[in-house]
Amino acid sequence: MWSLIQAAGWPIWLLIFSSIVALALIIERLWMLRQVTVAPKGLVDKVLEEFKARGLTQELVNKTAQQGPLGRVLAAGLINVRSPRAVMKESIEEAGRTVAHDLERFLTTLGTIAAMSPLMGLFGTVVGMIEIFGSSSPTTGNPGQLAHGISVALYNTAYGLIVAIPSMAFYRHFRRKIDDLVLEMEQQAVKLVEVANQERK
């Protein structure tokens, strides 16, 4: 393995670095975008139950805000629970935009790695081909060595695809996951608004 890395030339180190970064981002996003972390099941029901029993308290707002992204959205609604419906919805929407932006953290980097890895692999292959043909001459060229050199240069392209394919797959997966989580948080927030509005009536 080490001999292949050495033979592929210095461009492959860019791909190795990119693969390490992509792997770290994938692991981090898998951990941070779990359902239990972003939008715990039954959270809005617990908040509403305590709100109905004890009313709006600072303790309830603080405790709700600590329950992940959904908790922050619900806390924004609780702070304005005595305000008109439009004000309450606007505060929830503002908090939701901030939360959605936080959930998309690092996705741009992962998408960039997925898009650039094949190009970096192609660049490594071109550099390798230039070095191979530059070091050979019509009189001293060995066809066997030339074929081996070309195959080694193509390792850059192969490694670039190996990095790009899973990176793109996880990028798409995370985009869909975030869309689903944001939709669920919106539905939970609407439930809070509806119940609070009924309580005022």
Image (cartoon, rainbow, N blue to C red):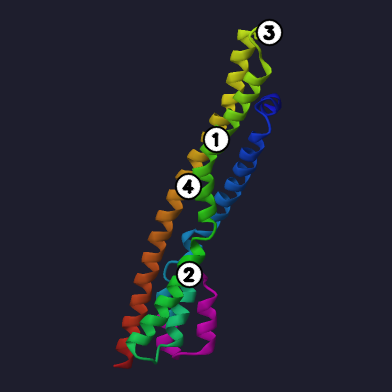
Mark 2, residue position: 99
Amino acid marked by disc 1:
Gly
Q: Residue at x 64, y 39 (%)?
A: 16
Tell me, for residue 140, which label it has, or none.
3
Give yes or no for contact between labels 4 and 2 (Cβ–Cβ under 8 Å): no
Query: How far apart in space, not on screen, are marks 2 and 1 (Cα)?
Result: 33 Å
Any part of residue 78 in sight: yes
| Badge 1 density bin: few <14, some 14–19, many ≥20, Cα 10 Å | many
Residue 97: name its quadrant: bottom left
Amino acid marked by disc 4:
Phe
Q: Which residues fall within the magenta stretch?
A: 48-69
Mark 1, residue position: 160
User: Which sits earlier in the primary sequence, circle 4 or circle 2?
Assistant: 2
Q: Residue at x 49, y 60 (%)?
A: 104
Residue 87 image position (x, y, % from top left)? 37, 86
Query: How far apart in space, not on screen, are marks 2 and 3 (Cα)?
Result: 64 Å
Amino acid marked by disc 2:
Val
Query: How far apart in space, not on screen, are marks 4 and 3 (Cα)?
Result: 48 Å
Mark 4, residue position: 170
Asked whether 61 falls inside the magenta stretch, the response is: yes
Any part of residue 30 in sight: no
Image height check: is 48 above or below 111? below
